[in-house]
Image (spheres, rainbow, N blue to C red):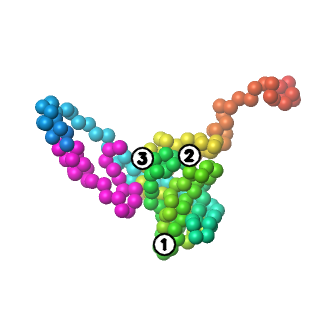
Amino acid sequence: GGLGICYLESDDPPSIDDWVKGVCDSVVAACTSRQLVLPKLLSEPGRSIVGPACVTAYTLGSSKVIPEIRTYLTVDGGMSDNPRPITYQSVYRSVVANRMSAPLTEKITIAGKHCESGDILIKDATLPQTQPGDILVVMATGAYNYSMASNYNRLPRPAAVLVKDGEAQVIVQRETYQDLIRLDRLPERLRPRAEIS
């Protein structure tokens, strides 16, 4: 909700001034026609602030070509770090960071690593020719991605890094497998005898 952002280059969300005017004009008209006292309006502009401020970087993995249908590229993340495409059919723009000047010649579908048919981050992205190990950057992922991330399929969540003026600082440490199993307990009856004594 709230003020929209540009997920795709073709998106044209209203300016904050136009959005406020549209909301206020609608509320004033509705209250006036019903002879109601004007309410105090509050807005939570979070997505419009943090959405475009963040990107998600993935490492490209293997590819799968289905002739005359689709080409898939896998990444080292997916629906556990960005559940919005499978949940809301959200769309994103992406670039290959280490091939920014290469011509955009390929139509590619970006698939996550979660062994789910719906784990598609971007369908039909226009990208340059790529290789495994290239860095795919998905734009405008600051709103909701981190707060919605999970350990689906027992995958650790990625780190979050703050970059400003050429300096990078880890602000959320990458999870490890040990982080995922630290709360697990093996009942005594299932332990090997040597471990019990």
Q: Mark 2 points at which residue?
A: 80
* Residue highlighted by disc 1: 104
Residue 111, x across and y down, in percent: 57, 57
Q: Is residue 171 visible?
A: no
In the rendered image, the quadrant that contains the C terminus is top right
Is residue 115 in view?
yes
Front position in the image: 114 or 55: 114
Q: Identify residue type, mark 1.
A: Leu
Which type of secondary structure does the marked residue at label 3 adopt? loop
The residue identified by callout 3 is 143
Which amino acid is tagged 2? Ser
Please state the extent of the stretch shown in magenta in the rendering.
Answer: 1-25
Callout 3: few (<14), some (14-19), or many (20+) C-alpha neighbours within 10 Å?
some
Query: Which residue appears at 60% of the width and 52% of the height?
Result: 117
Give the CA distance from mark 1 to mark 3: 27 Å
SS for callout 2:
loop
31, 46: nearer the viewer: 31
